[in-house]
Image (cartoon, helix red, strand yellow):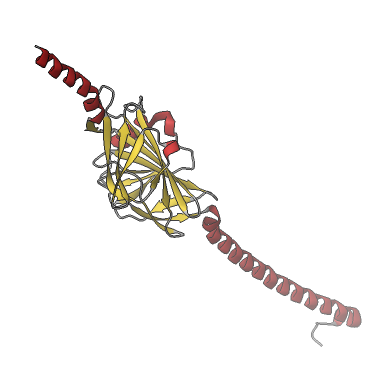
Amino acid sequence: MRFAAAIVALMLLAAPSARADATAPMTTRAASHEARVSHDEITWRSLYVGNAYYPGSGMTLLLDLAEPIVASLDAAGSPGVTPIVDGGAIVGFAIDADHVPSWSDGVALVLHAPRTGASEALLAPPLARGDVTSRIVVSGDDDLRFEPTAPQLERHVGYWAAASSREGERRACDEAIGERARLRLDEIPIYVTGAEASHGIRGHFTTSSERARPGIFFAAVLFVLVASGLGLAHLRLSGRARIEQAEAVLREEYGDSWGKPG
């Protein structure tokens, strides 16, 4: 009996430790990724929402990324989240359920990634692996915008999405994200899944100054054309005025007989 009691006691002592080491994959319904672009860095603020079940404390949830990304985790903005690194790149995240009590509702994290290229760029958001629909929004100084050139993405009225994307999936993503990531009127979101953009999203950045250059050029051309037209009209009018002035002088000199057959 003493031996059996000792075995039970050992099992009870080991149980909390076993729960603390337990891991499970995190199943996510939707995600939001907001990119703030500066001169040499892209800051990602990501939110994974609608994470499924796994009750109990002491769990470590594992979120696998669609593609390894080169970035650093901002610990202050990512409570309870630890990056899983392989070969110098982040391949996933481990979420400590004890430190993120509301993880089933949403897990937030912040990443800092280097910016490569001035205008042409490859965006690498931390997309969850699989068919989880993510909404990506890019912003920066001088009303910076990102326009994808990736062949799998198409421009629609007010958003970008893959040709295979369904309206119901986009709406479900927006509803799951809710008020925590409301779009501004001037923002054009990109909707993708990890399967559709596993190698990142190619495109180019533009600022309001750069977008205004073609308009300034055409305005200058139009100004030159209008000025040239007014100049020609002025020359014609001034030439006509000189002719009329000369005729008036001749009439004054010769009277009404000028200009009549002799």
What is the quadrant of residue 51 in the picture?
top left
**Position of 162 relative to 211 (above/below):** above
Q: Is residue 214 left or right of residue 127?
A: right
Quarter that holds the N terminus? top left
| Relative image position of residue 194 (x, y in whole percent) | 27, 44
| Relative image position of residue 100 (x, y in whole percent) | 36, 28
Pick the residue in front: 13 or 26.
13
**Position of 181 relative to 258 (above/below):** above
At a point 44% along the width and 34% down the height, the residue shown is 182
Pick the residue in front: 123 or 55.
55
Number of callouts:
0
**Position of 158 relative to 224 (above/below):** above
| Relative image position of residue 128 (x, y in whole percent) | 29, 41
At a point 39% along the width and 47% down the height, the residue shown is 72
- Furthest residue in direction front, as rendered: 2
At a point 34% along the width and 38% down the height, the residue shown is 82
Q: Can residue 241 be seen in this view?
A: yes
| Relative image position of residue 16 (x, y in whole percent) | 24, 23
Q: Can residue 197 be seen in this view?
A: no
- Furthest residue in direction top, as rendered: 1
Pick the residue in front: 135 or 111.
111
What is the quadrant of residue 174 in the picture?
top left
Q: In this view, does 7 lie to the left or right of 46?
A: left
- Furthest residue in direction bottom, as rendered: 262
At a point 14% along the width and 17% down the height, the residue shown is 6
Quarter that holds the C terminus? bottom right
